Image (cartoon, rainbow, N blue to C red):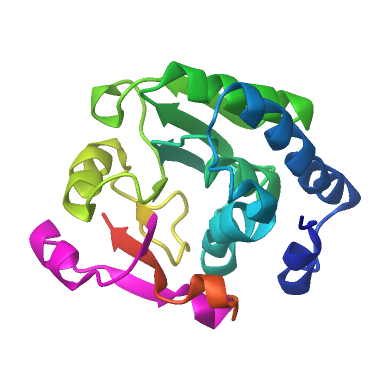
Amino acid sequence: MQNAEILYKYFSEFSPRQVEQLNKLEGLYREWNEKINVISRKDIDHLYEKHVLHSLSIAAAFEFEPGSEIIDIGTGGGFPGIPLAIFFPDVQFLLADSIAKKLKVVEAVAGGIGLTNIQTRHTRAEEIKDRKFDFAVSRAVAPLRDLWQWSRPLLRTKPRSAGSALQPGLICLKGGDLHQEIQESGTRPRLVEITELFPEAFFKEKYLIYVPR
């Protein structure tokens, strides 16, 4: 069993509401995971490190401006989308997945903690034609080549504000030897080693990949 303390080791600026939302996650995920399995049995005991903190590595490395719109491609049980929506309450998130029952868990968890900046959509990313986003985020759901192919048409061509340091782009969480995957994607991403942000053994050989539009 693990509580949310590992998050507060690296983030000190959470509001009381955010702390309350984060603390409620484990109970909700345990309850829903019994009905619809979205997190492996061995991982549920390490929810805060392996899922929540992993997702929040994006927040540790990138700042999303208020009003930004983010799509989480293949959100599964809501990662990285739900932790990011807690962290950035003034940012709008669309959590998309092709498996409807996973979105049922996402909606129940978001409702259970009172998240109002999340929408869900039962769809594949490549089928979305009606919206543009500032960033696409994803956690190891497909090779980088595919993620970039799906996300690029969804991204705005210019940053939300003229002074923004970040171009619209894809930010994904991946692990292992990525050399071949990056080569095959035809992209030139920026890599961040997560152990530089959170020096925990679990994050060894895990990376943030940012591909600007």
Residue 130 position, x and y percent, is 33, 20
Instruction: Please indicate, yes or no, whether residue 75 appears anywhere in the rendered image.
Output: yes
Name the outermost residue toward the right.
16
Q: Residue at x 26, y 54 (%)?
A: 213
Residue 105 position, x and y percent, is 60, 25
Is residue 129 on the magenta stretch? no
User: Does residue 106 lie above or below 48 as drawn?
Assistant: above
- The front one of 90 and 101 is 101
How many discs mark residues in the rendered view?
0
Residue 10 position, x and y percent, is 71, 72
Name the outermost residue toward the front.
42
Q: Residue at x 59, y 28 (%)?
A: 106
- The front one of 180 and 155 is 180
Residue bounds of the magenta highlight: 172-197
Q: Position of 178 compared to 77: left or right? A: left
Q: Where, quadrant-wise, is the N terminus in this rendering?
A: bottom right
Residue 129 position, x and y percent, is 27, 22
Is residue 180 on the magenta stretch? yes
- The front one of 87 and 111 is 111
User: Does residue 160 lie above or below 132 as drawn?
Assistant: below
Q: Residue at x 55, y 64 (%)?
A: 57
Q: Residue at x 36, y 26 (%)?
A: 131
Instruction: Please indicate, yes or no, whether residue 168 appears anywhere in the rendered image.
Output: no
